Image (spheres, rainbow, N blue to C red):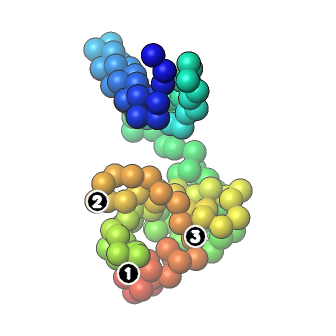
Amino acid sequence: MELTKAKANELGTLAEKAVKDKLHEMGMQYSVKKGSGTFSDLEFTMKLTFAVLGGETQQERDYKNYASMFDLPLEMLGSTIANYGGKSIKVTGLYPSRRKNDLAVTNLADGRELVAPHEQVLRAWRKEHNA
């Protein structure tokens, strides 16, 4: 039996669910997120990210630490923007070492984590919040 992209994705989803279920069973307060992976005909490797629930993420900390350097208002972190490129988004953090898409946002429609240029998001936030 050889691995295909669809089979590797299915295995990754199964592994993520199994780990989540076991953590819940053990009463541990972590979130688990399936990351990127690689596969060949015979092997599949993937990344799982564990995070403490309710804890502050590195992107949130970076936003708070570097907001003034990027001329970003602190109150924009965690706020929602109803119309950014036709999507409703929530600002979740900053990637200060990235050149272009340096702002972490979440698509409120499907919960996907995305990145965007901070200048464009700031412009949309100011327009919506009259800031």
Secondary structure under tag 2 reads: loop
Callout count: 3
Which amino acid, by three-letter code, is at mark 1?
A: His
**In the rendered structure, which disc, 2 or 1, sits on the residue that comes first in sequence?**
2
Is the C-beta separation of discs 1 and 3 under 8 Å? no
**In the rendered structure, which disc, 2 or 3, sits on the residue that comes first in sequence?**
2
Q: Is residue 54 left or right of residue 73?
A: left
- Give the number of the mark in front: 2 or 1: 2
**In the rendered structure, which disc, 1 or 3, sits on the residue that comes first in sequence?**
3
Separation of residues labelled 2 and 3 (CA atoms): 20 Å
Residue at position x 58%, y 32% from top? Answer: 38
The answer to whether residue 81 is seen in the rendering is yes
Q: Badge 3: few (under 14), some or many (20 or more) residues near its Cα, within 10 Å?
A: some
Quickly name the residue at label 1: 129
Above or below residue 74? Residue 127 is below
Q: Is residue 47 left or right of residue 26?
A: right
Which amino acid, by three-letter code, is at mark 2?
A: Ala
Numbered badge on residue 109: 2
Residue 42 occupies quadrant: top right
Above or below residue 34? Residue 19 is above
Residue 44, percent from left and from top: 54, 24
Quickly name the residue at label 3: 117
- Give the number of the mark in front: 1 or 3: 3
In-front residue for pair 51/42: 42
